[in-house]
Image (cartoon, grey):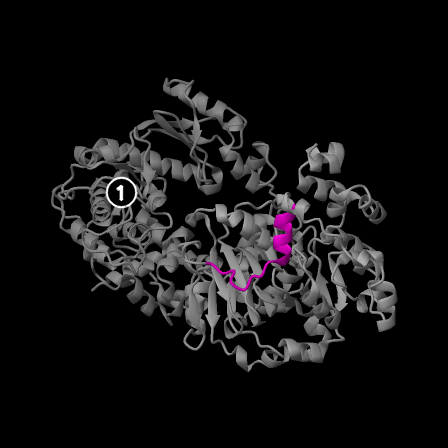
């Protein structure tokens, strides 16, 4: 008979990990001890020291007297029996003479159990050389900066504002008092009798223990735990003012909005002391905060994933919105209890990952500081015995995430009300931003249309746009009205703002009331009609054909909202947007692109020429006759009664811009405060037809990278799809070729300044490349094919372009701009910004 079957009986069919972690782990301490008498196999499994760790800490963990005199004796079984310090005589008579002091060895059993052997390795392995190598690590790297050269302004623009982690060395840590006081020898001498809070990640019902530093250091020098205990103490600075003064918050992290709560603020700073193999498993820091961590002793191996990437191999119960932990769950244990330990993840999951799936990694040496942006997943593995200090903070760049987290927890905790009140008193300039976040993140609504659709919150309503159980009958009704096949499969292609669906032949777009639905519907309907009736035949193929428009519910219905819709022809090849093609690999202002430049799958010169020609074709259309709609206008007046629709639009945006930019809080506060004096007082300063040339017929209104579709094809197919003049050169196999322009919902059908349409193209499509901007203007202003004199005026070009940028309706473009040109945050005034962004002459 197989020795395992003989030793375990009928239980031999159960895998070792289940037998240990799901059966033996449920036994009482006495039952587990008795199991050792059954057989050699039972003996080996029941003497697993990690099982006895749980029993020991469950029995003694809340006994203050025992824990303050705690003495780890090399194994948790012996510590369970004798948890406190004894005299030398008592040690000899009681401990070393105890029959359980000697552990019987059955190496043949451990050798034949992968579970036991792997566990033994994890408990005993040395990590001195456990560092990432070029062969195993991700291609992406965490930047390393020299603190002697990294200014606060540069850190803010390159890292904090862009949510990019960074390791900072030579940051003056050697000048801290902690640099000497918190070294191992001095730490034990100075704070040996001090009681610290010790984290017990997987050792039973007491997640935190109180232990003297003297007892703890004895433990880490003799333990062989798979998940060692580690000091994670948030009260160290309050308990000992000398420890609070032993370190300084680095200059990059001194802004902390939670300080408005004074002594009522949640825990935010910790001293962390732990042995090799300890660390924090995958987690996101609480309440939307960012964090910094500085090591005094030992090295840490960090692994990070951005907020949108869920760490592979992770089993986790998320708490709060977007994976953020609860406000007062300020320890990693909230998320760690069901996830793999750091070492286990590295040994079992990491080797299975392809390079592109691996996390960003770096080794943090003593004296170095790492910055973890809000929302980033991170894991830490201590390679050596380590001492470190860390703080979480809320500042201008993560305030949105902090507000989101607190608002979504306000029914559970009362921190939001206090934080909100104090913030408005201390930082009144942030009131527009905070008020907007309350409207955005509050998960309830009195909107009658949302309630009519069967939802109680705006978020659920928006998520419902992707629910075919709700929308398929409506789509089928629209298809029936069009006389189209109702049995063709329907797919959801909504991006969240509106319900959008397609089948093999058409796209059906409904317009939500939340995003100016009726106005957007009318604009897009008129724009497609104008294109169909007037655009040059050469360009008709680049715009979808309008099949039908209408309202889902007629006027006689008692519905609060009639749900307007458009049906347009779908691209037969499916179409992939430029945004999808360049995700993670688009242009940035630092890229050097020649006039026929290529990067990735895109020929940027071709995209630039395509954009210029398409816009020129739209701008050359005759403007919609306002007289036909019983309106009068004058492009040269500022009288509201006769103001042209484009000037009315600009006038409205001028009045809103300071408030809107304060709500978005994308630009630096000092720049936002200068907006009223920087912007013009009249829309005629932006566009004067007597100075800037004729009105464009139709403005697209938002020609960004998501609204340019194309195909990836062979050179032969590409030439067949593109016969416009800008494609004289051969297209290489596998390149993305633009074919279609979509989404005219933001169009200005009464015309306007051609320069206005350049804003999203330059920022989103051309990635703020001034070389490509010059090419675009050359192509546009020298286009004589259509036979008119449409031009983009160069009068006060950079000033007017910057004005239009500040008046832009959609914050995504402004965020993208600051992402492309982070140095904007270092500019002192808007004159410097306009030169940085638009200065090409």
Q: Is residue 752 above or below residue 257?
A: above
Is residue 536 visible from the viewing direction of this image?
no
Q: Quadrant of residue 550?
A: top left
Quadrant (top left, top right, bottom left, bottom right) of the C terminus: bottom left
Quadrant (top left, top right, bottom left, bottom right) of the N terminus: top right
Q: Is residue 780 above or below residue 97?
A: above
State which region is magenta.
Answer: 116-132
* Residue 457 in the image, given as x and y percentages of width and height: 59, 41
Q: Is residue 80 above or below residue 621?
A: below
Q: Residue at x 63, y 80 (%)?
A: 181
* Residue 288 in the image, given as x and y percentages of width and height: 57, 57
For label 1, the residue is 698
* Residue 230 in the image, given as x and y percentages of width and height: 67, 63
Q: Residues within 10 Å of mark 1 (few under 14, many from 20)?
A: many
Q: Quadrant of residue 182?
A: bottom right
Q: Judging from the image, what secondary structure is the residue with disc 1 in? A: loop
Q: Residue at x 39, y 58 (%)?
A: 819
* Left or right of residue 616, residue 832 in this image: right
Q: Nearer the viewer, residue 576 or 243?
A: 243
Q: Nearer the viewer, residue 695 or 198?
A: 198
Residue 131 in the magenta stretch? The answer is: yes
Q: Nearer the viewer, residue 700 or 695?
A: 700
Is residue 526 visible from the viewing direction of this image?
yes
């Amino acid at each position: 008979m197989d020795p395992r079957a003989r030793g375990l009986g009928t239980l031999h069919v159960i895998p070792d990990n289940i037998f240990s972690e799901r059966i033996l782990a449920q036994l009482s301490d006495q039952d587990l001890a008795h199991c050792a008498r059954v057989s050699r196999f039972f003996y080996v499994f029941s003497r697993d020291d990690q099982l006895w760790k749980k029993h020991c800490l469950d029995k003694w963990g809340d006994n203050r007297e025992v824990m303050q005199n705690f003495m780890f004796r090399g194994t948790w079984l012996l510590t369970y029996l004798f948890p406190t310090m004894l005299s030398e005589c008592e040690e000899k008579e009681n401990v070393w003479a105890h029959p359980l002091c000697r552990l019987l060895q059955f190496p043949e059993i451990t050798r034949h159990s992968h579970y036991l052997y792997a566990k033994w390795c994890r408990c005993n392995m040395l990590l001195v050389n456990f560092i990432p190598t070029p062969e195993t690590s991700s291609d992406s790297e965490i930047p390393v900066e020299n603190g002697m050269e990294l200014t606060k302004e540069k850190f803010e623009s390159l890292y904090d504002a862009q949510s990019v982690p960074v390791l900072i060395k030579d940051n003056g840590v050697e000048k801290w008092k902690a640099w000497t006081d918190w070294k191992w020898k001095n730490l034990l001498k100075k704070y040996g009798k001090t009681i610290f809070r010790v984290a017990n990640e997987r050792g039973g019902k007491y997640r935190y223990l109180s232990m003297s530093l003297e007892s703890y250091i004895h433990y880490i020098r003799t333990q062989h735990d798979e998940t060692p205990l580690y000091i994670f103490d948030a009260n160290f600075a309050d308990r000992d003012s000398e420890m609070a003064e032993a370190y300084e918050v680095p200059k990059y992290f001194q802004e902390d909005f939670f300080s408005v709560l004074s002594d009522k603020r949640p825990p935010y700073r910790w001293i962390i002391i732990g042995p090799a193999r300890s660390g924090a498993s995958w987690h996101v820091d609480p309440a939307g905060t960012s964090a910094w961590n500085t090591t005094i002793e030992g090295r840490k191996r960090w692994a990070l994933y951005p907020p949108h990437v869920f760490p592979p191999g992770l089993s986790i119960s998320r708490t709060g919105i977007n994976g953020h932990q609860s406000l007062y769950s300020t320890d990693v244990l909230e998320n760690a209890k069901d996830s793999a330990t750091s070492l286990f993840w590295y040994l079992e999951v990491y080797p299975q990952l392809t390079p592109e799936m691996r996390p960003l990694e770096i080794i943090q040496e003593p004296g170095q500081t790492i910055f973890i942006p809000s929302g980033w997943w991170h894991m830490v593995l201590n390679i050596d015995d380590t001492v470190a200090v860390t703080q979480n903070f809320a500042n201008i760049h993560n305030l949105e995430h902090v507000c989101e987290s607190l608002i979504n927890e306000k029914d559970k905790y009362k921190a939001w009300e206090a934080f909100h009140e104090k913030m408005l008193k201390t930082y009144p300039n942030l009131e527009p931003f905070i008020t907007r976040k309350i409207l955005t993140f509050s998960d309830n609504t009195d909107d009658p249309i949302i309630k009519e659709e069967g939802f109680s919150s705006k978020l659920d309503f928006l998520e419902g746009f992707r629910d075919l159980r709700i929308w398929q009958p409506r789509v089928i009704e629209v298809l029936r009205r069009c006389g189209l096949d109702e049995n063709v499969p329907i797919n959801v292609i909504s991006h969240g703002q509106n319900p959008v669906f397609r089948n093999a032949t058409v796209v059906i777009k409904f317009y939500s009331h939340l995003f100016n639905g009726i106005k957007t519907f009318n604009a897009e309907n008129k724009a497609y009609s104008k294109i169909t009736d007037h655009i040059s035949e050469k360009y008709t193929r680049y715009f979808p054909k309008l099949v039908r428009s209408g309202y889902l519910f007629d006027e006689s219905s008692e519905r609060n909202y009639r749900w307007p819709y458009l049906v347009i022809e779908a691209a037969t090849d499916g179409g992939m947007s430029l945004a999808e093609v360049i995700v993670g690999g688009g242009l940035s202002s630092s890229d050097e692109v020649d006039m026929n430049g290529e990067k990735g799958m895109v020929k940027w010169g071709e995209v630039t020429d395509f954009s210029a020609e398409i816009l020129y074709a739209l701008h050359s259309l005759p403007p919609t006759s306002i007289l036909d709609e019983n309106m009068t206008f004058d492009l040269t007046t500022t009288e509201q009664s006769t103001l042209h629709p484009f000037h009315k639009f600009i006038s409205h945006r001028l009045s809103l811009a300071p408030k809107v930019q304060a709500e978005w809080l994308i630009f630096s506060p000092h720049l936002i405060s200068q907006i009223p004096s920087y912007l013009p007082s009249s829309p005629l300063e932006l566009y004067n037809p007597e100075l800037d040339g004729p009105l464009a017929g139709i403005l697209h209104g938002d020609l960004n990278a998501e609204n340019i579709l194309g195909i990836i094809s062979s050179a032969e197919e590409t030439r067949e799809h593109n016969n416009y003049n800008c494609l004289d050169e051969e297209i290489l196999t596998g390149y993305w070729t633009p074919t279609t322009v979509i989404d005219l919902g933001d169009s200005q059908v009464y015309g306007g300044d051609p320069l206005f349409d350049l804003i999203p193209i330059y920022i989103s499509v051309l990635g703020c490349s001034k070389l490509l901007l010059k090419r675009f203007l050359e192509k546009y202003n020298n286009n004589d094919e259509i036979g008119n004199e449409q031009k983009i005026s160069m009068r006060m070009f950079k000033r007017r372009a910057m004005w239009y940028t500040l008046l832009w309706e959609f914050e995504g473009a402004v965020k993208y701009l600051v992402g492309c040109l982070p140095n904007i945050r270092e500019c002192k005034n808007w004159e410097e910004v306009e030169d940085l962004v638009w200065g090409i002459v």
